[in-house]
Amino acid sequence: MQHAVQVMYVLSAALFVFSLKWMSAPATARRGVLAGEAGMLLAVVGTLLRHDVVNYQWIFIAFLIGSAIGVPLAYLMPMTAVPQRTALSHAFGALAAALVGAAEYYKHTPHGFIMGALVMETLLGFLTFTGSLMAFGKLQEILPTRPIVYRGQNVINLTLFAVAASFGVALVIHPEQTWMFPIFAGLSLLFGVLLIIPIGGADMPTVIALLNSYAGLSASAMGFALDNKLLIIAGALDGSSGFILSVIMCRAMNRSFTNVLFGAFGQVQVSAAQTAQRTVRSASPEEAAEILDSARRVIVVPGYGLAVAQAQHKLRELHDSLTRRGVDVQFAIHPVAGRMPGHMNVLLAEADVPYDRLHEMDEINSEFAQADVALVIGANDVCNPAARHDRSSPIYGMPILNVDHARTVMVIKRSLSPGFAGIDNELFYMDRTLMLFGDAKAFLASIVKELAAAAKAA
Amino acid sequence: MPFDESVLFVFMLAAFLGFELIRRVSPLLHTPLMSLTNAISAIAVVGAIVITGEAGATTLSKVLGFIAVTASTINLVSGYLITDRMLKMFKKRNGGR
């Protein structure tokens, strides 16, 4: 029987590998999910069959409660809330790893390598748990989304981490000193909170990816502690995935990890005041509809504001209406647009925008020069030309979408207030830019209505 | 338990394999990818089941294990379901995939 369990674990690990492999393209991605589910099922059934597992009652009750919460969480969450859900899910996974670590410790106070693995598992598990809850709070706007900063923050955080790590090392050397464990756990929990509160909403894509990586590494550490290779493999796959995504996000902002974690990006810039007197040109929905109607090529640049305004369906209607009238409409997606990697793609897919119209930055950037209109909806920093030439700008060096190369630029925005990062955007003051002030959803609806009226008149 | 260094090799190889697999994923699918790997990290359920169901588990182990099984079940159930829900929405122009 125990050999059968090992075989099931090996098959499960193989299915996880296939799952990620099939995830690489939309055509096979759903098969990937199926493989992942099968892998997880094998792992769970295999574990239930192990001879050391004898009491099933509490396990099944926990399965029922977990499913009763998990199913509605998956089906009732609107697509705009996917980043929050992901953060919450990271929190649950990490909590599980941390608690298993704690239980293992109290069970047989292990020594040496096993204890080292347990310490890693609980540290990463607990800090990912509270860190993910903070990220959830910020994304759900229960907590202020602006960075919470105070004097000496980095010193306090680093000191706290050093103290937590010292307790961890001390526990590895003297595992029998059980009084240290609750302190170690408490410090890890606290560190998770303090690590995330200074991080602003615009940096959430990197942070979520990083927390994803930690949750995986924590599971891997559990595998070391329990001598279970399936846990090591699944955890390592998850850990490397989160790590790659956070590197991609950092690169897309031209920033380093340290800068994201300790830079407290997003404080309002003093220089924003100087530009207040500059004038902008604004336009009505009728004028916007007219310009769009006479365009041949339109590139839409969506940002987090699109998700906030829940305007993705109206945007699809605009896309349909323009496409019917022979206008070529494409979408340009910046890697850090939104609050998690790929956020905009999911949002537009939900609204039935065909995914072959969604283009990555490198793919579409050269095409802005041939576009008649670039329509920016709820995006700001990702198309701020200051990133190219203004050395004093906090976003200097960040790769941006070349929106300013289009013949006409239209920006749908509530007001002229600076974007999330608090940086003024010179794009708004260009001669070829038209500001469309208003709620994105309402404004898009008016444009669609104008287009329909024009079609009838013609 | 004697230290078996083969676990370190397993970790190293799996991490490299992960890097190679993830690098190939189109940015289009980064959100579903993250929720899929998040669901896979719920593999912690394996450890949680053992802790909860072991012969001679203490009350503390049972309580911690019970919470851990619940938390990782939430993680894996919602993770897989929402990943599939998202992927169902990705369509090409002609309605194909």
Image (cartoon, rainbow, N blue to C red):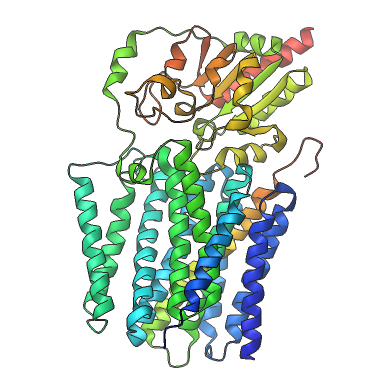
Q: Where, quadrant-wise, is the C terminus of chain A in this rendering?
A: top right
Position of residue B11 in the picture relative to residue A146 (left or right): right
| Residue A156: % across, % down | 19, 52
Residue for point 53% across, 80% down: A59
How many numbered dots are placed on residues in this image? 0
Residue A437 seen anywhere in this rendered image of the structure: yes
A145 vs A383, nearest the viewer = A383
Residue B75 seen anywhere in this rendered image of the structure: no
Q: Where, quadrant-wise, is the N terminus of chain A in this rendering?
A: bottom right
Residue A188 lies, with reference to residue A286, above or below; the image says below
A125 vs A314, nearest the viewer = A125
| Residue A194: % across, % down | 28, 52
Residue for point 30% across, 28% down: A268
Residue B70 lies, with reference to residue A394, above or below; the image says below
Residue A186 lies, with reference to residue A194, above or below; the image says below
Q: Residue furthest left?
A: A151
| Residue A116: % across, % down | 34, 75
Q: Quadrant of residue A165?
A: bottom left
Residue A356 lies, with reference to residue A387, above or below; the image says below
Position of residue A236 in the picture relative to residue A17 (left or right): left
Residue for point 45% across, 20% down: A385
Position of residue A447 in the picture relative to residue A261 (left or right): right
| Residue A242: % across, % down | 50, 54
Q: Quadrant of residue A395?
A: top left
